[in-house]
Amino acid sequence: MSILLTQFRRDLLVAMRNRSDAASPLVFFALAVLLLGLGTGADALGESAPGTVWILALFANVLAMESVFRRDGEDGTLEQMLIHARPLFVAVLGKLAAHWVLSSLPVVLLSPLAAYLLHGSLVGIEVLALSLLLGTPTLTLIGAIGAALTVGTGQGGLLLSILVMPFYVPVLIFGASASTAAAGGETAFALLWLAALLAASATAAPFAVGKALAIGQDY
Amino acid sequence: MAEKLACTVGGRRLFRDLDLVVKAGDLVEIRGSNGSGKSTLLRCLAGLLEPQAGRVERRVDMDYLGHKLGVSARMTPLENVRWLVGLRGEKAAAAALDAALSRLGVGAARHDLCGTLSAGQQRRAALARLLVCQTELWLLDEPLTALDDAGSTLVRELVADHRADGGAVVCATHRALSSPAGGSASSSLPATRIVTLGP
């Protein structure tokens, strides 16, 4: 537990000293919502607002994912983490938790406002936030496997999106369907699926990320 | 201990059938021209790189200092060292961290961001973790880079002290790392071994 907290605090500290990096996913999300709200009419958006918020949250996540290991890979602190962290998956979990808090938690908190700006119905707006709260950590956990594999290649961006996008799809489908159905009633099914996906990825992904980081050192 | 190591990087065979046994108190210097595979060998020994053939067996805990220092520019020397100790699940007294940083000559700069320090100071901050983590085996890749004369002498002292304490050092370097002859500490230590790579 202390290893997890050590890595968690360290990553928050580094991010706070580099605010422009840390804020970029949120800025992207806010700008996209504003522009969509301005550029499209209320009739066109209305019903699809929850789905739109979900897609934007997903893109914000992918954009942030690229940088999760990049700086550490450049200055060698990633190597040190691989060498010294015992066990490694705990440190990885701490790192990903910090990354989620920085990149996705603000998006989750802003999502009700975003849905409102996109002319969405206010009914079920809490389900949208809840589905994002359950879904975005899964995105971060899965995306980190891809980011760990591409960190050694030095060209994350496009490769990473292509690599992880297929695995993001189930999360997007359950998330969007939960929030869209919220206006109608039955949402528990999709939310439970999101929770199950989160539990599965939180269990498996830290090990996979650790292994992928070790492989990524082979260049 | 390494056995029949072979490594190929980008299609070039760097070394093969390389055997190396390192015991407590040993200092092994890896020599060779640029591109002969010194860093690759160290990364293999550290477990960061998978050799194409052979195996590396490590019975003790080790520390690795490579070309990338492993010091975050956005943290102070003190925070960098403390983070690493925390990752190992250990607790270090603040006094011990300060003492290590002071010995390396970055005690006064321990609260400055590493990004504002010079290359030599950053390396000194990185070397401080060797003292704090206290692993048996040190794998050092060109540890004297960017260091001034006093810094180089200091590293030689650290290596000699570490060997006297029963530690071992494997080091890629172009400049001899063993203590100046006649030192009291060095007399009881095994002779430096030199492994030369390349044609």
Image (cartoon, coloured by chain):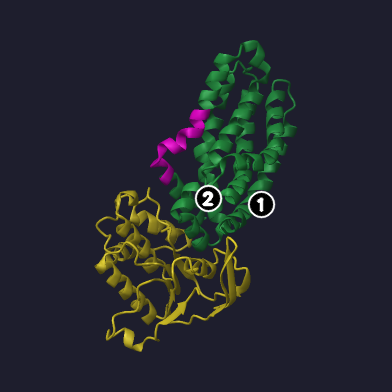
CA gap between label 2 and label 1 equals 14 Å
Query: Circle 1 marks a residue in which chain?
Result: A
Q: For residue A189, which numbered disc appears in the image?
A: none
Q: For residue A94, which numbered disc appears in the image?
A: 2
Relative to A39, is A108 above or below? below
| Colour chosen for chain A | green
Relative to A74, is A168 above or below? above
Q: Are marks 2 and 1 on the same chain?
A: yes
* Picture quarter with the N terminus of chain B: bottom right
> Please, what secondary structure does the residue beneath circle 1 have?
helix
Q: For residue A204, which numbered disc appears in the image?
A: 1
The x and y percentages for residue A177 are 72, 28
> Please, what secondary structure does the residue beneath circle 2 have?
helix
Q: Earlier in the sequence, mark 2 or mark 1?
A: 2
Q: Is residue B38 visible?
A: yes
Relative to B176, is A51 above or below? above
Query: Circle 2 marks a residue in which chain?
Result: A
**Closer to the camera in the image, B91 or B79:** B79
10 Å crowding of disc 1: few (<14), some (14-19), many (20+): few
Q: Residue at x 44, y 66 (%)?
A: B34
> What stretch of residues is rendered in magenta?
A14-28
Relative to A43, is A94 above or below? below
Amino acid carrying label 1: it is Ala
**Closer to the camera in the image, B150 or B125:** B150
Name the magenta segment's main secondary structure. Answer: helix
The x and y percentages for residue B92 are 39, 63
The x and y percentages for residue B147 are 30, 64
Which chain: yellow? B
